[in-house]
Amino acid sequence: MSEQKIKLLRVIRFDRSDAAVFETMAEADEWAVSGAFAFAHLDAAELSGKTRQAFANGFLGTASFGRSTFVVIGEAGTADRDEIVYRLARHFVAHYGAPDLDAALPAAEEEVAFAQSLARDQPINTVLTVRRVLSADGTIKEEFRTIRPPAGEPLHARIWTIENDDP
């Protein structure tokens, strides 16, 4: 029996600008989640510099735990998903005060389920961005945007032509 395929978020890098923008840059092709949970304990005064940029526009890579400006919809297997959940749960224990893996797993599952819901109805290779704001009551609001090529434009540029060598 073959593994069920699902859609998840994967880091994509168009250039190295994330290295200058974020404290830690996510690696290309690693699986990603929204990662808004990382800012739940911060107030507006703590959101400055690279932390502010990560809050405002960064997805969280689940291998490096670095940030990325862009993610793309990718196809994953259920084993990939399970590994992401487990990796996030370990991260919650190590960095966010979860008492143990059993306590952290439901929160990690919820974070991955949210990422999966963002990807579910999108075509593979659709690029997403995030915009976050902190509302007056301290609630984090997220807005996700898809980036598609202009209508009527080819998806790939022609880089060569083939010409016949016959005289």
Image (cartoon, rainbow, N blue to C red):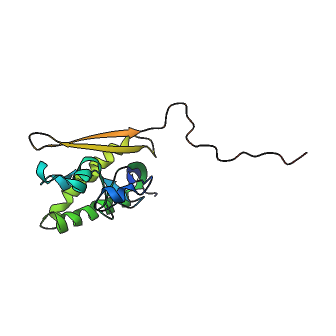
- Which quadrant of the rendered structure holds the C terminus? top right
Residue at 34%, 58% in the rendered image: 20
Horizontal side, residue 13 vs residue 107: left or right? right
Horizontal side, residue 155 vs residue 24: left or right? right
Going by the picture, which residue comes out furthest to the right?
167
Residue at 37%, 60% in the rendered image: 80
Residue at 55%, 40% in the rendered image: 155
- Residue 123 occupies which quadrant of the picture? top left
- In this rendering, the count of numbered labels is 0
x, y percent for residue 93: 17, 66
Horizontal side, residue 100 vs residue 129: left or right? left
Q: Nearer the viewer, residue 150 or 53?
A: 53
Going by the picture, which residue comes out furthest to the left?
137
Q: Is residue 153 above or below residue 133?
A: above
Q: Is residue 153 at all visible to an observer of this figure?
A: yes
x, y percent for residue 21: 31, 55
Q: Nearer the viewer, residue 136 or 65?
A: 136
Q: Nearer the viewer, residue 29 or 81?
A: 29
x, y percent for residue 32: 33, 55
Q: Is residue 24 above or below residue 136?
A: below
- Residue 19 occupies which quadrant of the picture? bottom left
Residue at 28%, 61% in the rendered image: 23
x, y percent for residue 77: 41, 56
Q: Is residue 43 at all visible to an observer of this figure?
A: no
Horizontal side, residue 138 vs residue 128: left or right? left
Q: Is residue 146 above or below residue 2?
A: above
